[in-house]
Amino acid sequence: MLRCTPFLLFDGDCAEAMTFYHYCLGGELTLIKLGDTPMKAQFPPEKHDRIINARLNVGELEISATDWMSDAVTRRPGNTMSIYVTGGSYDELKTPFEKLSEGAGKETFQALHEMPFGIYGQFTDKFGVPWIFLGKG
């Protein structure tokens, strides 16, 4: 079953922001630093303390977030929030990913592919809306 949740992008203060939201809303907060994952080898050491995945669950409310990792794309108002689609398998994500990404820009496009944490893909659609897809792999 597909699910959508807000996905927030921060610039080094993800842990602080998500801890604040946890304080305000309660629930369960998970913070994973880049340096604690196999992906750390793909990034310079100065980024290892950044949050690669944060998730706050408060009943039916879920907020996901990360710190900005890319040097190729400039962080600016309008690209600091995405629609985050989660699902199970590659097959479940493939059709909506392909349909929504028709006409998408190439700057942020990453086809659905296997990552250490599951199936991942992203793009900015033809209307300028950023999308991130994550499956269980």
Image (cartoon, rainbow, N blue to C red):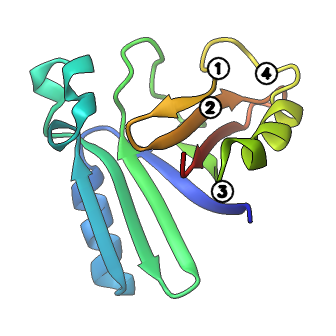
Q: Earlier in the sequence, mark 3 or mark 1?
A: 3
Mark 3 vs mark 1, foreground winner is: 3
Q: Residue at x 28, y 71 (%)?
A: 20
Nearer to us in this view, 104 or 92 = 92
Marks 4 and 2 sit apart, C-alpha to C-alpha, by 10 Å
Q: Residues within 10 Å of mark 3 (few under 14, many from 20)?
A: some
Q: Earlier in the sequence, mark 3 or mark 2?
A: 3
Residue 12's x, y, as percent?
A: 24, 40
Q: Are marks 1 and 4 in contact (CB under 8 Å)?
A: yes
The quarter of the rendered structure image containing the C terminus is top right
Kindly identify the amino acid type of the residue bearing the numbered disc 4: Ala
Q: Are marks 3 and 2 in contact (CB under 8 Å)?
A: no
Marks 1 and 4 sit apart, C-alpha to C-alpha, by 7 Å
Kindly identify the amino acid type of the residue bearing the numbered disc 1: Phe
Q: Are marks 2 and 1 in contact (CB under 8 Å)?
A: yes
Marks 2 and 1 sit apart, C-alpha to C-alpha, by 6 Å
Residue pointed to by mark 2: 122
Quadrant position of residue 96: top right
Residue pointed to by mark 1: 109
Q: Are marks 3 and 4 in contact (CB under 8 Å)?
A: no
Q: Earlier in the sequence, mark 1 or mark 4?
A: 4
Residue pointed to by mark 3: 87
Nearer to us in this view, 91 or 63 = 91
Q: Residues within 10 Å of mark 1 (few under 14, many from 20)?
A: some
Numbered disc 2: secondary structure: strand
Numbered disc 1: secondary structure: loop
Residue pointed to by mark 4: 104
Mark 3 vs mark 2, foreground winner is: 3
Residue 132's x, y, as percent?
A: 61, 41
Kindly identify the amino acid type of the residue bearing the numbered disc 2: Gln
Instruction: State the mark number for residue 132.
Output: none
Q: Earlier in the sequence, mark 4 or mark 2?
A: 4
